[in-house]
Image (cartoon, rainbow, N blue to C red):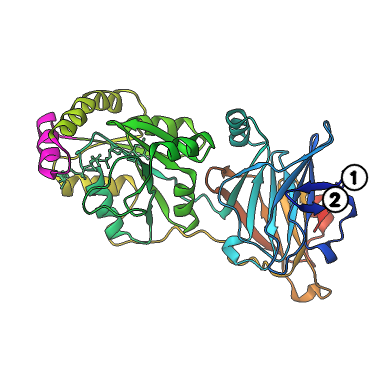
Amino acid sequence: MREEAPEFSHDGFHCVSPIELDSKSLGCQTTTIVGEKIFVVGGPDDGEGSCLSVRVFDKSTGKWSVPTILGTKPLPCKGHSAVLLNNDRILILKQDALPDDCTWFLEVDSPFVRDQKKILETEVVAWSKGVKGDGLKPVVISGPSGVGKGTLISKLMNEFPHTFGFSVSHTTRAPRKKEKHGVHYHFTDQITMEKDIREGKFLESAQVHGNLYGTSIEAVEAVTDSGKRCILDIDVQGARSVKASLLDVMSIFICPPSYEDLEKRLRARGTETEEQVQKRLRNATAELEQGKSSGLFDHILVNDDLETCYQNLKTILGLNESSDASNQTSMEGVECSTFQSLTEKNQKVLIHYNSNSLESKTLFVLDVSSLKGGAPGRTRGLSVYAINPFTYSTKGILGNNKEINC
Ligand SMILES: Nc1ncnc2c1ncn2[C@@H]1O[C@H](COP(=O)(O)OP(=O)(O)OP(=O)(O)O)[C@@H](O)[C@H]1O
Ligand SMILES: Nc1nc2c(ncn2[C@@H]2O[C@H](COP(=O)(O)O)[C@@H](O)[C@H]2O)c(=O)[nH]1
């Protein structure tokens, strides 16, 4: 899988072609060929570990480029191994990483990356962290202003602080008295936010009641990276965009018992001027029509009595009264410090160890046949199991395999 490519030079960073690299002297670097392109991950070791940088060599043009990198980047590591999966993503297994931080995917031609390439008109790759099991879908909670979305979400977060994490949106509206930057919203300005949207940093964005609001990819990833189930409080336009995106979510629409109740709640909250209240109420009519009729939402709840609505929300989310089981998904059991290389065949990746005494080692197989999700967000559906090296032969599991070494 290694091929010759000319010298790469970018911003003063100088690197020889992949074929000439010596991983011992230059630090860990892998090359992976995907069609006409060669993806080089990692670079010379600067003493603090490889930063898993990415460069691309296009064989058809003979040119190197540094792609736009989306998603949350993995922390530096001492080394890594790489193997191409499905011709659209590279599995990166980090060495010396914590168990829940060792499996990453660099998407190079996934549907999300292809979409972003069209939008950004440049070479794009996207990082997505791998998690064991299916995880739970992020939850979109939508409904007209004043219906009680924030109140219900606060109750949920207070009762289940280890289970749920709030996706902190960006907005150009001014903060209310008790609102904190980075907690309730990332308060920003129109120019900065529009630039970030153009650069593909947002999962969705919409003009709502005269201001710009949006969910950044990072906001969702920050929650999923902490092992919690992500909650998004967004308007109906945002819910529609998220549904059209590749993020697989559960969506819930909250209705008021009546338009009059909605008006009373909005006024009683006392956070908006009369003009803003009028605007929000005008928009509520259309939002209620769309929310109830379009089949956009998986569930519709009426927030009449708060406690009843909250209990119904908990039922939808599969929570029983006393549980706060964290949905932490990790790669516990997989020892990330000593493996040397990966071998892939039939959607199964065998992790080879750098050890002479296999007697004392268990081998692990990473089953990637049921991957779900991916950038923007985590790649779920990984399954890991141990095999006894004496009972199974590598050929038996993997057949004639291909191998990529660090
Ligand atoms: N079931 C309910 N009965 C009566 N009042 C309620 C109920 N639910 C919420 N409220 C009150 O209604 C007001 C609006 O609620 P909240 O701020 O949670 O709405 P929201 O949907 O998050 O609004 P926005 O979209 O503008 O952020 C608050 O003062 C809240 O205390
Ligand atoms: N499309 C999006 N809508 C959002 C986002 N964050 C909040 N919202 C919605 O805006 C209104 C008004 O909120 P307020 O805090 O000013 O009262 C409300 O319906 C929210 O659900 C977002 O990121 N994207």
Point out the quarter of the image occupied by ligand 1: top left
Label 1, residues with CA under 10 Å away: few <14, some 14-19, many ≥20: few
As helix, strand or loop, the secondary structure at mark 2 comes to: helix
Above/below status of 289 relative to 47: above
Q: Which residue is mark 1?
A: 4
Mark 1 Cβ and ligand 2 under 8 Å apart: no
Give the number of the disc on residue 386.
none
Q: Residue at x 47, y 59 (%)?
A: 226
Q: Is residue 227 magenta?
A: no
Residue in view at x 80 percent, y 49 percent: 31
Report the front residue among 302 and 165.
Answer: 165
Q: Position of residue 166 (x, y in %)?
A: 36, 51
Q: Is residue 40 left or right of residue 7?
A: left
Q: Is residue 68 positioned above or below 43 on the image?
A: above
Residue beneath disc 2: 18
Q: Which residues are magenta?
A: 256-273
